[in-house]
Image (cartoon, grey):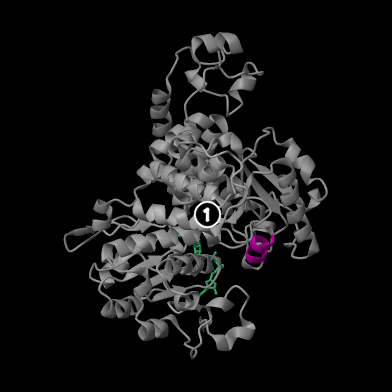
Amino acid sequence: MPETVNKRGVDVLHDPRLNKGTAFTPAERDKLGLRGLLPPRYVPIEEQLERVYENYGYKESDLAKYIYLIGLLDRNETLFYYLLERHLEEMMPIVYTPTVGLACQKFSRIFRRPRGLAISLDDAGKVDQILGNWPYQDIRIIVFTDGERILGLGDLGLNGMGIPVGKLSLYVAAAGIDPILTLPVCLDVGTDNDQIRFDPLYLGLDRPRERGEAYDQLVDEFIHAVRKRWPLCILQFEDFGNANAFRLLAKYKDVGPVFNDDMQGTGSVALAGVLAALRITRQPLADQRIVFLGAGEAAIGIAKALLAGLQDEGLTEQEARDRFWLVDSKGLVTRNRLDQLPIHKRPFARDEAAIGSLAGVVAKVHPTILLGVSGQTGLFTEEIVRTMAQHVQRPIIFALSNPTSKAECTAQQAYTWTDGRAIFASGSPFDPVKLNGRTYRPGQGNNAYIFPGVGLGAVVSGATRITDSMFHQAAMTLAQAVPDHLLKEGCVFPALTAIQPVSARIAVAVATEVYRLGLASVPEPPNLEEAVANAIWKPEYRSLV
Ligand code: NAD
């Protein structure tokens, strides 16, 4: 069925959803008034791919590559996704971490075209009207940030907009969510990052970050305006600071389908990585001693996900908690610090004497699993890793802090200091490492393995809530999706090239959970695999005649 188009000529070429560039057929050129506006030769998408990939190759820096890709997205959405899907392994580090971090830092300086909605404190009272300015009527996934804690980079204010844009492009590339259903949003509430705020080219509000009533009112107005307009739209909290992330999720998690990827997505992907690592060591989760460096959003999200995994193996909640040691900037999180601990850390406080350092905790606990989510580089020192490896045959070490420059240790260090015995994964990608004639392949614990599949499953079933149990199902599915040949190389995540089928499997598992919980608004299809497959959008040009 040809698409109905009520635009002509350059207006068609300037609409990234309609534009096909040189791939408009002669008949389309006639009908849409494009003759002469394009070079005469018709070029199919495979040939366009060759051209854009070659152009991409001319860009020497990662930032230049990012700018090129976003330019293509703004020009021709279909071709952008056609390119991204075919080179996902190469380009994910450009459209997402680590390069997106740099792109956010420079967002206002490299700005070319608006994308998504920027809603500022000055817009209070008019949010519904602003949503109405968005040209598409059926929005099913919104990723939104207030820019306070972008990756491990801190407060970037409006410049954080690059993150929702990047994440939503991964929903499309990794799970085939139709881009027309997605909307990136940045709530601009000011910034306390003076370097950004006083940059003469900064595009956000020129004021310190709002932390009072006006902040809560804007978030509330936004969430309720979305709910009224798009009741089934998934709202994904992204890169909010600690003080807001925990309380806002608690406040809004039952106001329709809502989740926080930094906690729930991270928890799920880390649980999957741990379960896959235990497929290598052939040990139960219940036998592990798990030390966390960091006790923030990621750590608490992971601890909650592991808690559910441990309970699956028959442990009580308390027995499960006893498997965790959380270390923050002040040392081991213990009950004698309870008065000073923020509420999210308290359930994981241990009833034992204080230990001031990670080295002290590792020496005492002999962890089997060491998880780095501190946002600080280099804290898994040689001494710490070697101490761990003295007591454990296959130390499981995940240095998850992003971007790459913030990782607690590198892949090379983890393998070298353990004589190749470590099972290593990271948040941002590391290249394979050659050591003593063997190649070790570090896994990337990228949330992109989880949230796109969760989103697709929720969209297909019309989920009215997003629950922790859905993320749990996603983790179990992901852990099982790692092929044996990758586990043999020590890699605990599937190849990014296989991400679409993995996301589809996750979507089926998530939708199954949605139906089991009675949280679906779409009648259960006779064949869920087929329903998921049919919902997948493909970057192909639709006929316009
Ligand atoms: P956060 O700010 O909520 O938490 C950071 C925690 O680290 C805090 O508890 C803080 O006390 C602790 N910390 C800081 N300095 C420390 C030090 N010197 N020693 C010990 N602890 C210290 O941040 P977050 O959202 O939890 O994210 C943390 C890191 O995890 C970031 O770099 C982020 O990019 C990364 N992350 C990775 C993934 C992934 O790989 N899939 C997902 C989410 C977050």
Residue 265 in the image, given as x and y percentages of width and height: 51, 57
Ligand 1: does it lie within 8 Å of the C-beta at label 1?
A: no
Residue designated by label 1 = 101
Position of 375 compared to 494: left or right? right
The answer to which image quadrant residue 468 occupies is: bottom right
- Tell me if 210 is positioned left or right of 139 in this view: right
Tell me if 23 is positioned left or right of 385 in this view: right
Residue projecting furthest to the bottom? 353
**Could you say which is closer to the camera, residue 237 or residue 288?**
288
Asked which quadrant contains residue 199, the reply is: bottom right
Q: Residue at x 65, y 41 (%)?
A: 116
Whole-percent x, y for residue 191 in the image: 69, 60
Q: Residues within 10 Å of mark 1 (few under 14, many from 20)?
A: many
Figure quadrant of the N terminus:
top right
Residue at the farthest right position: 125
Looking at numbered disc 1 in the image, what kind of residue is underneath it?
Answer: Gly
Vertical arrangement, residue 237 with respect to residue 72, above or below? below
Using the image as rendered, state which of residue 195 and residue 424 is in the foreground: 424
Q: Quadrant of residue 30?
A: top right
Camera-side residue: 493 or 59?
A: 493
Tell me, yes or no, if residue 425 can be seen here: no
Q: Is 362 rendered above or below residue 130?
A: below
Which residues make up the magenta segment?
A: 244-251
Q: Residue at x 25, y 73 (%)?
A: 393
Label 1 sits on a secondary structure element that is helix
Q: Residue at x 33, y 58 (%)?
A: 492
